[in-house]
Amino acid sequence: MNTRRAGYGFSLGTLIAVALSWSANHSILWAIIHGFLSWLYIAYYLLTHTLR
């Protein structure tokens, strides 16, 4: 059986990061940057928005 786990396209982390970034900043540029950082931005967002 030949299965591939990593592939091309967007990962779940990228999509979540872009959605969170867009809802917080309403900026396409920041959404793209946060999409590249994906899981790092998600962790940052959760830490900063849950500790308020």
Image: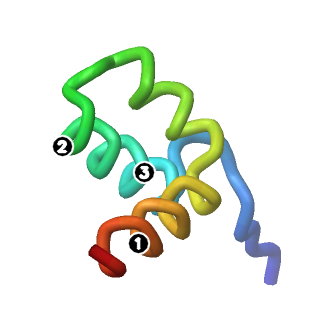
Q: Residues within 10 Å of mark 3 (few under 14, many from 20)?
A: many
> Which residue corresponds to the image point at 71% horizontal and 69% vertical from the top-left?
5
Q: Is residue 36 above or below residue 38?
A: above
- Does 22 sit left or right of 29 as displayed? left
Q: How is the image coloured?
A: rainbow
Q: Position of residue 21 (x, y in %)?
A: 34, 41
The x, y position of residue 25, in whole percent, is 26, 32
Q: Which mark is residue 46?
A: 1
Disc 1 residue type (three-letter): Leu
Dot 1 or dot 2, earlier in sequence: 2
Pick out the residue farthest to the front.
52
Q: CA distance from mark 3 to mark 1?
A: 11 Å
The label number, if any, that marks residue 23 in the structure image: 2
10 Å crowding of disc 1: few (<14), some (14-19), many (20+): few
- Please tell me whether mark 2 sits on a helix, a strand or a loop: helix
Q: Mark 3: which amino acid?
A: Ala
Q: Is residue 25 left or right of residue 5?
A: left
Q: Which residue in the protein does label 3 denote?
A: 17
| Residue 21 marker | none
Judged from the image, the secondary structure of the residue bearing numbered disc 3 is: helix
Q: Quarter holding the N terminus?
A: bottom right
- Which element carries disc 1, helix, strand or loop? helix
Classify the position of the C terminus by image quarter.
Answer: bottom left
**Is 6 situated left or right of 21 in this image?**
right
Toward which corner of the image does residue 27 lie, by quadrant? top left
What percent of the width, then of the height, locates residue 39?
59, 61
The outermost residue toward the top is 29
